[in-house]
Amino acid sequence: MLGITHFASAQQMNQNYNQSDFWQRVCFGGGLGISFGDDFFSGSISPSAIYQVTPQFATGIGLDFTYTDAEYYNAFVYGASAIALFNPIREIQLSAEFEQLRVNRDYDVIGGGSITEDYWYPALFLGAGYNTGPVTMGVRYDVLYDDDKSIYASAFMPFVMFYF
């Protein structure tokens, strides 16, 4: 009985040590966006978390929620992504992110009626940026970009990432 109790206590201590070590390597971040104008509003929130595997490599996941409402158009987009970050040197960060989005959008047609679209859209972003610590600024490119289906205006996009 004492041997089983001691073994169980040792297992619990090892689990606590591993948990604290795990959470020390996790960083949280993401993005917020808002734009508005005459009969136009768009807002997005994109939380993410990464795990620092080594000083040069991190991997993680993200979520994305975007709502757009315009005079003749509205959309709700949501999805998730898998993220990989590599720093060959401290100041340079290379990134890969696979994003899978569910797109629900409606267009009003001139002369009456509307068009409704509801589909999944994949994106694979490859990027490079300048790392200043918790902030990285750079550009990324969607290698799966489809001009007819993408919610993004271009395959090239500037980015700013924050992780704390």
Image: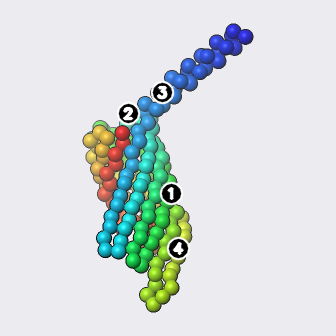
Q: CA distance from mark 4 to mark 3?
A: 45 Å
Give the quarter of the figure containing the N terminus. Answer: top right
Q: CA distance from mark 4 to mark 1?
A: 16 Å
At label 3, the amino acid type is Ser
For residue 20, which numbered disc appears in the image? Answer: 3
Q: Earlier in the sequence, mark 4 or mark 1?
A: 1
Determine the residue positioned at 39% across, 49% down. 30
Residue 96 % position (x, y): 42, 50
For residue 55, which numbered disc appears in the image? Answer: 2
Q: Earlier in the sequence, mark 1 or mark 3?
A: 3
Q: Earlier in the sequence, mark 2 or mark 3?
A: 3
**Frontmost residue, 93 versus 26:** 26
Badge 2 marks a residue whose secondary structure is: loop
Give the quarter of the figure containing the C terminus. Answer: top left
Farthest residue, direction right = 1
Q: Residues within 10 Å of mark 3 (few under 14, many from 20)?
A: few
Determine the residue positioned at 46% across, 32% down. 23
Residue 47 % position (x, y): 43, 49
Residue 93 % position (x, y): 33, 44
**Frontmost residue, 123 versus 72:** 72
| Residue holding disc 1 | 79
| Residue holding disc 4 | 117
Q: Residues within 10 Å of mark 2 (few under 14, many from 20)?
A: few
Q: CA distance from mark 1 to mark 3?
A: 29 Å
Confirm whether residue 92 shows in the render.
no
Cβ–Cβ below 8 Å for labels 1 and 3? no
Badge 3 marks a residue whose secondary structure is: helix
